[in-house]
Image (tube, rainbow, N blue to C red):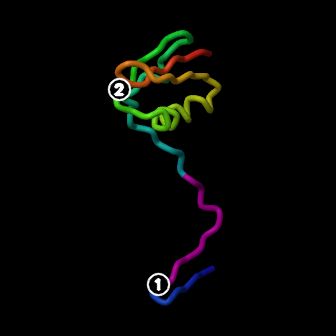
Amino acid sequence: MSYTNSVKTYEVEMDVPVPPKKYNRKSKYPFSTMQANQSVMIPNKTYAAIMGLLRKHKLSGKKYVVRKSDGGMRVWRIE
């Protein structure tokens, strides 16, 4: 099946497998290695930025608490 706009023609294909995601980049934050009851201070980040960093870790069932502290935001792994 082809799709043509005013400039270019595109070929629409079926049954092309999606390649797996490749994560070659290591995180600069230790969230994945933290055990329950451990904490880490993250300076110069907002609460919203920390929650964004934790999103993928929370999807795996880990639980965290973030609180403002002197010098930045402190993240505790609680489960």
For residue 62, which quarter of the picture? Answer: top right
Residue ID for mark 2: 43
Q: Secondary structure at mark 2?
A: loop
Q: In the figure, is residue 42 to the left or right of 77?
A: left
Furthest residue in direction top, as rendered: 37
Q: Along the line of sight, which residue is nearer the eye, 37 or 20?
A: 37
Amino acid at dot 2: Pro
Q: Quadrant of the C terminus?
A: top right
Q: Residue furthest bottom?
A: 6
Viewer-nearest residue: 12 or 25: 25
What's the residue at 54%, 9% (across, down)? Answer: 37
Could you tell me which residue is drawn at 59 percent across and 56 percent down?
A: 17
In the image, residue 67 lies in the stretch drawn in magenta = no
**Type of amino acid at the residue the image marks with label 1:** Lys
The quadrant of the picture occupied by the N terminus is: bottom right
Secondary element at tag 1: loop
Q: Would you call the spot at circle 1 few (<14 residues within 10 Å), some (14-19), or many (20 or more)?
A: few
Residue to which mark 1 is pinned: 8
Rendered position, 59 above or below 32: below
| Disc with the residue nearer the chain's start (1 vs 2) | 1
- The residues colored magenta run 9-18
Residue 39: x percent and y percent? 47, 14
Magenta stretch: dominant SS? loop
Q: Quick check: marks 1 and 2 in contact, CB under 8 Å?
A: no
Q: Is residue 62 left or right of residue 42?
A: right
Q: Which mark is residue 74?
A: none
Q: CA distance from mark 1 to mark 2?
A: 49 Å
